[in-house]
């Protein structure tokens, strides 16, 4: 509950202080390709979709259908496990470089807001209990990206992000995403 209030206290003033209502209303982002830092593995995906709403000209808040996992490195003693089916995300667009390129800050976090315990089998076949407090930094991913105009409201997207806080394996693995963004 306190995290939901924190989100409201941050987003409502930003919305109210916007100079003018956003000309663009919605954003859909398709993440087609992901490159993982830890093993330089590349994955193609057709199902990673971000849907967001502009709260002013430079800020988008939304939800993505990408599962929030305990990490992105399956080669660990404790295998990956799902934290949440969906994640919240925010894009904060910075000053345009030129008429075609706009850099942005990227934030993504699972929809878990309370302490939860996960029972996960390790590689020895034993079950381990892992407790996640889900404080504001737990499972928070931050990054940067650039959106390059292809045609009118269609953009090519390049984003890099990593965990703010180490995962259960002690890593802050990063991910590079290539995708398409459509503004409505």
Image (cartoon, rainbow, N blue to C red):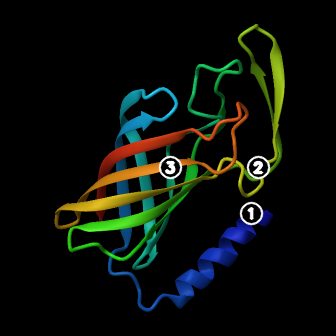
Image coordinates of residue 6 in percent, x first then y, are 72, 70
Spatial separation of the CA atoms under disc 1 and disc 3 = 22 Å
- Is 36 situated left or right of 124 in this image? left
Is any part of residue 103 visible from this angle?
yes
Residue under label 2: 134
Rate crowding at label 2 as few (under 14), some (14 to 19) or many (20 or more) other CA atoms within 10 Å: some
Q: How many marks?
A: 3
Q: Nearer the viewer, mark 1 or mark 3?
A: 3
Image coordinates of residue 151 in percent, x first then y, are 15, 62
Q: The N terminus is located in which quarter?
A: bottom right
Residue at 31 percent of width and 54 percent of height:
157
Image coordinates of residue 176 in percent, x first then y, are 42, 43
Disc number placed over residue 3 in the picture, else none: 1
Question: Where 36 sits versus 142, above or below?
Answer: above
Contact flag, marks 1 and 3 (Cβ < 8 Å)? no
Question: Where 5 sits versus 36, above or below?
Answer: below
Q: Earlier in the sequence, mark 1 or mark 2?
A: 1
Contact flag, marks 1 and 2 (Cβ < 8 Å)? yes
Mark 3 secondary-structure assignment: strand
Q: Earlier in the sequence, mark 3 or mark 2?
A: 2
Residue under label 3: 161
Residue at 65 percent of width and 76 percent of height:
10
Rate crowding at label 1 as few (under 14), some (14 to 19) or many (20 or more) other CA atoms within 10 Å: some
Spatial separation of the CA atoms under disc 3 and disc 2 = 19 Å
Disc number placed over residue 54 in the picture, else none: none
Residue at 54 percent of width and 89 percent of height:
17
Image coordinates of residue 16 in percent, x first then y, are 55, 88
Mark 2 secondary-structure assignment: loop
Contact flag, marks 3 and 2 (Cβ < 8 Å)? no
């Amino acid at each position: 509950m306190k995290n939901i209030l924190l989100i409201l206290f941050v987003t409502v003033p930003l919305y109210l202080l916007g100079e003018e209502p956003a000309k663009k209303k919605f954003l859909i982002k398709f993440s087609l390709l992901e490159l993982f830092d830890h093993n330089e593995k590349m994955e193609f995906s057709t199902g990673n979709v971000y849907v967001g709403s502009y709260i002013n000209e430079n800020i988008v808040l939304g939800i993505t259908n990408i599962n929030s996992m305990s990490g992105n490195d399956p080669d660990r003693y404790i295998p990956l496990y799902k934290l949440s089916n969906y994640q919240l995300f925010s894009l904060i667009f910075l000053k345009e470089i030129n008429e075609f390129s706009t850099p942005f800050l990227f934030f993504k976090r699972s929809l878990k807001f309370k302490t939860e315990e996960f029972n996960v089998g390790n590689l020895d076949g034993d079950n381990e209990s892992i407790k996640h407090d889900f404080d504001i930094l737990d499972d928070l991913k931050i990054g940067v990206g650039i959106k390059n105009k292809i045609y009118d409201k269609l953009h090519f997207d390049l984003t890099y992000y990593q965990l703010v806080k180490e995962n259960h394996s002690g890593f802050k693995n990063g991910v590079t995403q290539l995708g398409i963004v459509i503004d409505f």
